[in-house]
Image (cartoon, rainbow, N blue to C red):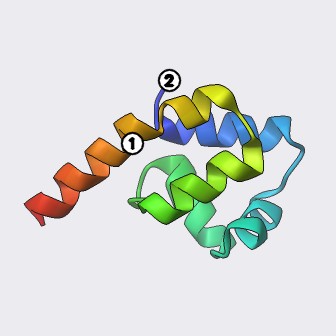
């Protein structure tokens, strides 16, 4: 499952709207929408906050993969 799909799944499971999740993460609901469609990169600090909001062991376990991808992207830009 891709990050965007997991994010949406967890948000819905927690009963959160995009606006509610955005408020918890300190971003706009447009940002959440773009993350869920895969049209905007996410940054490490937001991923860590997501792990805390969702308290999901699988999500947290996969942080290392997400972090590695973000590091590669930042080096390529």
x, y percentage for residue 72? 18, 50
Task: Describe residue 46's horizontal placement relative to residue 71 as left or right.
Answer: right
Q: Quadrant of residue 13?
A: top right
Taking 37 as reference, is 57 above or below it? above
x, y percentage for residue 4? 52, 41
Q: Quadrant of residue 59?
A: top right
Asked which secondary structure carries label 1, the reply is: helix
Q: Nearer the viewer, mark 2 or mark 1?
A: 1
User: In the rendered structure, which disc, 2 or 1, sits on the residue that comes first in sequence?
Assistant: 2
Task: Describe residue 44's horizontal placement relative to residue 56 as left or right.
Answer: left
Residue at the location (77% across, 72% down)?
23
Residue at the location (67% across, 75% down)?
26
Residue at the location (9% across, 59% down)?
76
What residue sits right under mark 2 in the picture? Answer: 1
Asked which secondary structure carries label 2, the reply is: loop
x, y percentage for residue 74? 20, 62
């Amino acid at each position: 499952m891709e990050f965007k799909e997991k994010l949406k799944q967890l948000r819905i499971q927690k009963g959160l709207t995009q606006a509610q999740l955005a408020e918890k993460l300190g971003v706009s609901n447009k940002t959440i929408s773009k993350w869920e469609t895969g049209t905007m990169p996410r940054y490490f600090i937001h991923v860590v906050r997501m792990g805390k909001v969702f308290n999901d062991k699988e999500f947290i376990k996969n942080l290392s993969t997400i972090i590695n991808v973000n590091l590669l992207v930042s080096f390529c830009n």
